Image (cartoon, rainbow, N blue to C red):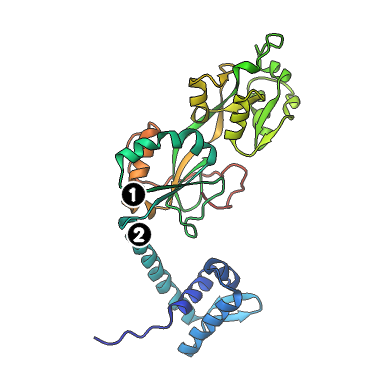
């Protein structure tokens, strides 16, 4: 068998990233090296070939015919290596890493994990509470749970729950001298906000309150779980949904005010790259989570949604 003659892997990776991304700088960011290192590796590859791979015109880079011939072969090869590597990692053990919206993790997921451990004692679970969008190609994350509108690029997005918001507070907060009989009566109490004043303003408008500008007051909390914790401590009235407030409502730490529930256009989603669910441990977690959410078994599929996660513009990434 003839000896296989190949250039250095680092040079091939540098060229493939720069050619695929159309930029030496973006390639440097992806590979976590300097712009000079990418340039050096590409130049090294060109010297071995004794051919140019790029036309260099100022800051722009354009592939030569040789570069265009080489790029698809390298991209396919690196994709195949990455896929097999991830399959081997998934089948040979290691923790299952789940990136999850912090409030959902604290108030819904964690209390149910005992069931998952009993059903899958061989899977080590690693939770990463995060409100940021996960870049699955760059981060050591297998699967994620996010709250938003969906539509996160090239990931599978399965809706777990839709959310209906309603006011809650501690029973001790209510003062008989300031009864809460209709939404307008909330003016007499502090309002607790999650991220923005907009959620309360929207709920009041949907509940029929005209000119609810008075709602733009009160403390802001980064996470819904903090606003609900403050509500349970008697600090004011918060907006909640069943996924986050169910335990507090059942145990009497919170009570629901009014039967008015306003559907939120956002929802809780299970998200993962299509390749990730080929790992048995990821598939096991996905199927268990769907069961806990009351969803029927369903084949893997990609949902096409024209939407964006809360507080982010379209195209800002995915969870």
Mark 2, secondary structure of its residue: helix
Judge from the rendering whether residue 234 lies leftward or rightward of residue 33; answer left or right: right
**Disc 1 crowd, CA 10 A, few/some/many (<14, 14-19, 20+):** many
Q: Is residue 148 visible?
A: no
In-front residue for pair 71/188: 188
Q: Is residue 200 above or below residue 30?
A: above
Q: Is residue 285 left or right of residue 190?
A: left
Q: Work out which quarter of the rendered image holds the N terminus and state it.
A: bottom left
| 57 vs 276: above or below | below
The answer to which image quadrant residue 187 occupies is top right
Drawn side of residue 187 relative to residue 111, left or right? right
Q: Quadrant of residue 264?
A: top right
Residue beneath label 1, please? 281
* Residue 160: x %, y % from top left: 44, 36
Residue at the spot 60% in from the left edge and 27% down from the top edge: 239
Q: Name the residue rendered at 45%, 37% in the picture.
A: 110
The residue at 43%/33% (across/down) is 111
Q: Which mark is residue 142?
A: none
**Label 1 to label 2, Cα distance in Å?**
11 Å
Task: State the residue position of label 2.
Answer: 89
On the image, the x and y values in percent for residue 316 come to 58, 52
- Say if 157 sits above or below 218 in the image: below
Residue located 54% across and 50% down the image: 133
């Amino acid at each position: 068998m003839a000896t296989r003659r190949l250039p250095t892997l680092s040079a091939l990776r540098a060229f493939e990233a720069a050619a695929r991304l159309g930029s030496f700088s973006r390639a440097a960011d992806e590979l976590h090296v300097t712009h000079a290192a990418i340039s050096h590796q590409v130049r090294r590859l060109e010297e071995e070939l004794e051919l140019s791979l790029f036309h260099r015109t100022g800051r722009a880079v354009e592939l030569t015919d040789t570069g265009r011939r080489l790029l698809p072969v390298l991209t396919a090869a690196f994709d195949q290596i990455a896929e097999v590597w991830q399959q081997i990692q998934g089948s040979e053990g290691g923790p299952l890493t789940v990136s999850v919206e912090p409030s959902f993790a604290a108030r819904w997921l964690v209390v149910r994990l005992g069931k998952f451990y009993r059903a899958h004692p061989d899977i080590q679970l690693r939770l990463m509470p995060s409100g940021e969008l996960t870049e699955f190609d760059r981060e050591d994350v297998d699967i994620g749970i996010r709250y938003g509108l969906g539509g996160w690029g090239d990931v599978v997005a399965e809706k777990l729950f839709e959310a209906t918001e309603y006011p809650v507070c501690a029973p001790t907060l209510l003062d008989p001298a300031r009864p809460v009989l209709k939404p307008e009566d909330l003016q007499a109490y502090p309002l607790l906000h999650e991220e923005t004043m907009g959620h309360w303003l929207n709920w009041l408008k949907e509940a029929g309150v005209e000119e609810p500008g008075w709602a733009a007051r009160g403390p802001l909390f980064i996470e819904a779980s903090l606003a609900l914790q403050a509500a349970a401590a008697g600090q004011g009235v918060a907006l909640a949904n069943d996924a986050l407030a169910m335990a507090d409502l059942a145990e009497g730490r919170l009570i629901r005010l009014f039967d008015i529930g306003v559907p939120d256009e956002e929802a809780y989603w299970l998200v993962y790259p299509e390749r990730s669910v080929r790992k048995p441990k990821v598939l096991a977690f996905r199927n268990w989570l769907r069961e806990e959410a009351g969803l029927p078994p369903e084949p893997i599929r990609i949902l096409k949604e024209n939407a964006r996660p809360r507080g982010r513009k379209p195209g800002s990434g995915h969870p």
